[in-house]
Amino acid sequence: MRKAILSGAVMLCCMLQAAAQRSISVNEAVNLALQHNFNIQIAKSNIQIAKINNNIGVAGGLPTITGTATNQESIVNINQKINSVTGDRDLTRNGATSNNLNAGIAGTMVLYNGYRVITTKKQLEMIQAQSESFFNSQVQNTIAAVMTKYFDVVRQRSYMKTLEQSIEVSKKQLEIIAVKRKIGFANDADYFQAEIDLHSKEQDLQSQKIILEQGKADLFNLLSMPADSSAMFTDSIAIENNIKLEDVLNKFNQNPDIVAADQQITINTLAEKQTAAQRYPTLRVNSGLNYGRNSSNGGQILLNQSYGPYVGLGLSVPIYNGSILKRQQQAAAINTHIARVQKDATILNYQTDLTKTYQMYIHTLDLIATQYAINRLTEQLVNLTLQRFSLSQATILEVRAAQQSFEEAGYKLVNLNYAAKAAEIELKRVAGILAP
């Protein structure tokens, strides 16, 4: 009865542990990253800032209206000499109070400034478009990083399974030696060596588990999840083996980094026009309404009040400012040249990366087919050597060599699959076509 209860409790714990571990596919991982990744959130915020700034008012195309008001009370001593037709007379008063009230609304609007308003508005539109390109680039980079790390975790897990299979071989070998030892066909040295080999394999497995857990922590970081989160990454490495270099090159110009570099050229060209526009006259219309009231209980004028609207034009013409505008225009032209050079460098770097990645992609696909065959052969070799060992037709060294070949073949196979998948992801990223 106790055994039944204990068995049921163990099964329940296992079920709860399995339920606690969330299973995450690669598409789910990518979607989680796109929703919660901090760099994605920052890129979204930059788009919002660019949208807010993309306004005709920010470009200076809307009128500015200001209101002013002052109210001043004074206590003064008055000593005046007044010249009148009846003769001069003196006016003296101490502690006289006076009030000075002024209020007004003024508005001004640019009518012409060398089309600087229009140029600035176009530049703001291009900055908004560039922020969207930066966002698309961040999305592509995030998807690539998540996928690459996800399949790296799958790779480490696959190699761990290879080590587990090798440990099973070591356990069987130890069992065979133990049986032989009992009947006198194996000595203590063989038994101790088999135990040492088993413990060594188990240590390798523990080291591999640490590598796997660290890889998971890095992946959780990309998903903006705590490093100690619990999840299972269930997808296998499925390689798309029909990517053509011509198809990638045809979509090469869609790469958001190249699009952003081209937009930067346009932004700098518009900055040149903005600088050149400062050489032209600026014409403004000014209008407003003023109210003024001065009152005093002493002196010749007891009340002075005025109010009314006004309208006028203002013209400013730049004549000379120490060649500042000329130098600013020259610097703006250099910035445009730099943007063009940066675009050319970006294209060249991506083309080089594309060529190298595609070469590795094709070469790795060729190696994978051969490696699958080698992996099957090494697995058969381990089983056959273990059988021969049980019949005393093979030595411990031969079993160890077969195990080593099996582990190396398994490690190489998962590495080749991972390398091909990483190359596939990079090709799609450069082409700007990565999607969950």
Image: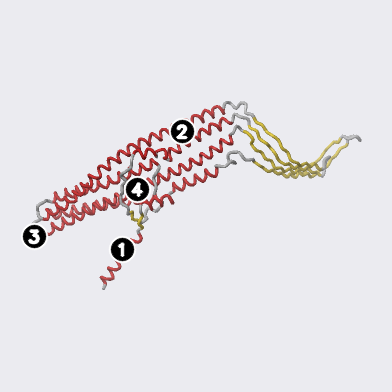
What label sits on residue 339 in the rendered view? Answer: 2
Mark 2 element type: helix
What label sits on residue 144 in the rendered view? Answer: none
Cα separation between marks 3 and 1: 40 Å
Task: Report the amino acid beneath label 3.
Answer: Ile
Which residue is rendered at x = 29% and y = 68% of the image? 8
From the viewer's perspective, is 209 left or right of 346? left
Residue 95 shows up from this direction: no
Which residue is rendered at x = 55% and y = 27% of the image? 326
| Tag nearer the camera, 4 or 3 | 4
| Tag nearer the camera, 1 or 2 | 2
305, above or below 171, in the image: above
Q: Earlier in the sequence, mark 1 or mark 4?
A: 1
- Return the residue at label 1: 14
Task: Report the amino acid beneath label 4.
Answer: Lys
Cα separation between marks 1 and 2: 59 Å
Mark 1 element type: helix
| Tag nearer the camera, 2 or 3 | 2
Instruction: Report the quarter where the N terminus lies.
Output: bottom left
Q: Are marks 1 and 4 in contact (CB under 8 Å)?
A: no
Q: Nearer the viewer, residue 323 or 382?
A: 382
Binning the other alpha carbons within 10 Å of mark 4 as few (below 14), some (14 to 19) or many (20 upward) gives many
Q: Earlier in the sequence, mark 2 or mark 3?
A: 3
What label sits on residue 183 in the rendered view? Answer: 3
Residue 431 shows up from this direction: yes
Residue 85 picture location, percent across and down:
90, 34
Residue 429 position by quadrant:
top left
Q: Earlier in the sequence, mark 2 or mark 4?
A: 4
- Return the residue at label 4: 149
